[in-house]
Image (spheres, rainbow, N blue to C red):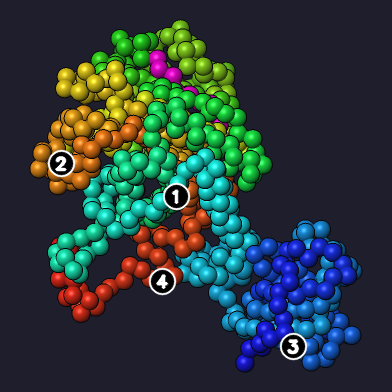
Amino acid sequence: MADSMNGLKRSIYCGEVLKEDMEVTVGGFVQKMRDLGNLIFIDLRDKTGIVQLAFNDETDRALFKKAASCRSEFVLMAHGKTAIRSSINPDIPTGRIEIIVDDLRILAKAQTPPFEVTSETNVNEELRLKFRYLDLRRPPLQRNLIMRHKIAKAAREYFYANDFIEIETPMMMKSTPEGARDYLIPSRVHNGKFYALPQSPQIYKQLLMISGMDRYIQLARCFRDEDLRADRQPEFTQIDLEMSFVDVDDILSITEGFISYLFKNVLDIDIPTPLPHLSYNEAMERFGSDKPDTRFEMEIVDFSDMVSDCGFGVFSDAVKNGGSVRAIVAKNSASVLTRKEIDKLTEMVRGIGAKGMAYIRWVDEKPSCSFAKFFGEEELTAIMNKIGCEKGDTALIIADKNKVTLPVLGALRLAVAKKLDIIPKDKFNFLWITDFPFFEYDEDSKAYVAMHHPFTMPNDDCLQYLDSAPEKVYAKAFDLVLNGIELSSGSIRITDYELQQKMFQTLGLSDEEIEAKFGFLVEAYKYGAPPHGGLGIGLDRLAMVMLGAESLRDVTAFPKVQNASELMSECPASIDKENLDVLGIQIVSKPDET
């Protein structure tokens, strides 16, 4: 049987044992036990670090024998007096101190774990996620979760100090179209009807402004049934805010104040404000992305005017069809971007929509050019001067419609930068992206859809184009980007009832659809709404970037894997027929399931 804690109470954490001649009681997990015959040392670990427990020839024999029985991950409490270690470990804060133990309790024994609980591990992630409770004992993941806690704490401190009120919004709501599939909850009481888990608190926080709450904040759980990737989980947390009687600049200013406060208090890093701004169009033209990583250069260069009438049909046809010919130049890369590597990059761009890729690679005295036979030497020299390609460089070129050319070069820019390892690891480059197009044309439905959401306020000078030229309508919408990752998306909201109806109609919604999906919000506008706007900052993504983590799974306690399952608890799981019958649900196999 396990020992009792009776008479022992923890007085200090392991990582805080820094002085000698102190009487202390610690508790934790056994990291390692070293039995040297007449000496036993146990490294005891808790969330703050490791301290060494020492047992020697003066230790009570029964106590010494108990120490010898300890194994990795046993749960112990120990009491004793601190002393200077004979062999100092400079690699840990407690490395000069040990505890001479006079009382030891084994509170829980442990089986040999499926992997060693250490800071560095080569164990595959699937096994670690299956035993996530053991994985979370590892110091890096504990530090990550503590960082996440600090971010949440700083958010509440800052927004409380700026007169925001924390209000919870419903977790079970009406399904409304917000860009991704909803997770649905069947109702037992209302047979055949469903609640939805919120993709965001968007509608409710607007209703709170109509209610007169003025400044709202919430650490809101959000749910989206979409395919996963490294920076996406089906459930996530937003630092969600909304403000009344404001315009764009007010929201950007309060957000910048939070970013400055957070980084100073958590990382002791000064973030200069105001943060830089780029319009959506400028970001796409220069970086091929509406969430550009500006920690490195390699900007896109347009040289369409130089090749519009050339003999190379790939270039000239792209320009004639309303597209463009653009390049990125990777400086001093020719020795790394070999022909074999260029072929790999060509396959990559074909996989994301490009027909192919041209290149100039300048290794020797004369550059190697994939389209050289269509141009004279002077013409090639002029092109290289235009795009800034010099000896030792590689230029990668895409020719197509802009909706292909720009995002493909944006993805290529990131892939090349990673291959060349030129992205600084210790920089935090924030950037506001503003002036988004209100509409984007959906090729599948042959209709315009809202780029953000249908409650976004158009710029005042664009209202005249709502009927005649939707592509000219820009929105009071803005995204906050950090190191190429979108942290937040926000906007000023439409508060005019008639304008909101007009926007719904422009998006092709019938009066019946408007009533069914947004009737309660539209009705609320009839009773007077203050001008308002807000945004939601992805807490998980923010933690990931601040920690330099590779994936959201590294900053989420119990994450889902790519197919949205959780390996430890094996969810989602089947439900028995009795419970399904209560809900009036019958499971029907999909056509491809036999």
The answer to whether residue 293 is magenta is yes
Q: Which mark is residue 66?
A: 3
Where residue 326 sits: x, y (%)? 39, 21
- Would residue 413 appear left or right of 192 to someone viewing this image? right
Q: Quadrant of residue 332?
A: top right
Labels 2 and 3: the sequence-earlier one: 3
Which residue is under mark 1?
166
Q: Is residue 165 above or below residue 190?
A: above
Q: Amino acid at mark 2?
A: Ile
Query: Of the residues under marks 2 and 4, which one precedes in the sequence?
Result: 2
Q: Which residue is mark 4?
A: 569
Q: Read off the magenta span.
A: 292-303
Real-space Cα separation, disc 1 to disc 3, in angstroms: 51 Å
Closer to viewer: mark 2 or mark 4: 2
Front: mark 1 or 3: 1
Residue 470 picture location, percent across and down: 21, 24
Task: Write the residue at 64% across / 83% down.
Answer: 107
Q: Residue at x 55, y 55 (%)?
A: 149
> Which numbered disc flags the more N-terminal residue, 1 or 3?
3
Question: Distance from label 4 to label 3 (Cα)?
Answer: 35 Å
Q: Quadrant of the N terminus?
A: bottom right
Determine the secondary structure under disc 4. Answer: loop
Q: CA distance from mark 2 to mark 4?
A: 40 Å
The three-letter code of the residue at mark 3 reads: Lys
Residue 283 placement: quadrant = top left
| Residue position for label 2 | 514
Considering depth in this image, is 174 or 243 the residue closer to the camera? Answer: 243
Which is more foreground, mark 2 or mark 3? 2
Across and down, in percent, residue 305 comes to 36, 10
Occupied quadrant, residue 247: top left
